[in-house]
Amino acid sequence: MFAFMLIISISGLFIPGNVDFGFKIELSEDAQLLANVAWLITATIFVLMMTPGLSFFYGGMVREKNVISTMLQSFIAMGIISVLWVVFGFSLCFGHDLGGIIGNPASYFFFNNVGGACSDSNFIEGLSIPIALFALFQMKFAIITPSLITGSFAERVRFSGYLFFMIFFFIFVYCPLAHCTWHPQGLFASIHVKDFAGGIVVHASSGIAALAGAMFLGKRKEAGEHLPANVPFILLGAAMLWLGWFGFNAGSSLAADGMAIKAFLNTNTASAVAMITWIVFDCLRGRKPSAVGAAVGAVVGLVAITPSAGWVSVGESVFISFVTTLICNFAVYFKNKKSNLDDALDVFPTHGVGGIVGTLMTGIFVYNYEDPAVKAELTHLQYFGNHCLVMAGVIIYSFVVSYGLYWLTNKMIPMRVSEESEKMGLDMSQHDEIYGAKVVEREIAEYFEHEHRNDEQ
């Protein structure tokens, strides 16, 4: 089976990628605008659904005494980031360019000048959708990015400390990277580095921040192998992520056009290939095929294709997904067996490594689909070199700044819960809520029994 997948993935490189995804019917300008608006509203809803999907995905993986806390850490981002985005976040990402690094916070302060027009002096001229809809679509990307980080420090982070870190990360990591990558005058965009839907901005940044968080907070007191609280939650979350990712990737075309169809096709294909590859490779290493492995593999494939989804051929998407999945699987194995890093839910080896490898693959394959003007300016090697250079810079910047933000937050509010709170479980100690009453009662009884023995001694 592995040999079969290997043959398919390599064969994909030799399949011509010149299929025409253009429409053969002519639409009026008004009709095309209405079609674009309808599709982007739908895509925006899909992308927002990914965050509760992530809540189920992460929540099912942790111990039963930490399910609610883990899910809430993702869910709460929909509230906090939405408010910050309206007040100044959209301006920082897409406002008037300041040195290619950040947007002017006054450009769209409190969504001023954000309405039904498709262009604005502060922004891109001639969007295919109204600026307000574009702002809402991009808001959902900003929401899910800090949510991804939470899996690395699951089961040991103080909720109030996490909230402050999330705000700082959004301002000092997410917004600059989004501006550099997606604003037409951004630093990365100016050297033709491509990121179709968030390989750099979402996955690499969150994965590196997750690595920094796991290192800063240290290991859990009960780190190591444990049974997931709810495997059906994991499958449900993966299914919601897969479905929502169609909006994430296909919506990033910003139009109801052939590029959206191509991204849709590549997204589904990459996820399917990765799911099969992950399971088969696990079996080669002596493990049984598992529901958790299938879910993780599917998500890795989605991460892998995100930076190039709207450009590469379907054969190339198969190859990208296959190679990235193998690398991520090795990364998870190395993290679990060869290192002391307690990245609780493997955020760095899946999202971080997947986003990095997917971006480098973009530098290899997307050059073939670039405009002639770009090819006249850069050779293929220079184009790939720019992606490598930017990726190295993003890794360093995201790690250093994120680690500094953990340190700063910890000085304000201790980010790690006490040993007693960790033993009791974050559901009870942080939120006074219960998932699985019998299990919690047992954990509390064990805790007090342990304390009683210590008192007697």
Image (tube, rainbow, N blue to C red):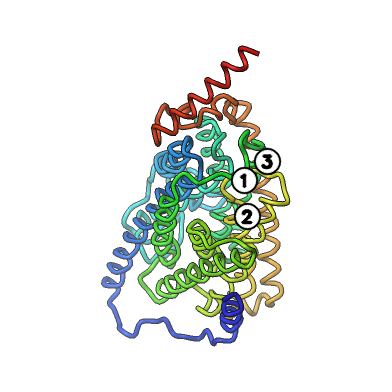
Residue 215, numbered circle:
3
- Three-letter amino acid code at disc 3? Met
Q: Which residue is mark 1?
A: 343
347 vs 433, nearest the viewer: 433
Q: In the image, is residue 452 above or below residue 63?
A: above
Mark 1, secondary structure of its residue: loop
Q: What is the distance, in whole Å, between disc 1 and disc 3 at their CAs?
A: 8 Å
- Three-letter amino acid code at disc 1? Asp
- Three-letter amino acid code at disc 2? Pro
- Residue 430: image x %, image y %? 47, 28
- Residue 196: image x %, image y %? 51, 65
For residue 239, which quarter of the picture?
bottom left
268 vs 186, nearest the viewer: 268
346 horizontally vs 257: left or right: right
Mark 3, secondary structure of its residue: helix
- Residue 350: image x %, image y %? 59, 56
Q: What is the distance, in whole Å, between disc 3 and disc 2 at their CAs?
A: 14 Å
Q: Which residue is mark 2?
A: 349
| Residue 59 makes an appearance in the image | yes
Residue for point 42% across, 26% down = 432
For residue 379, which quarter of the picture?
bottom right
Residue for point 63% across, 33% down = 221
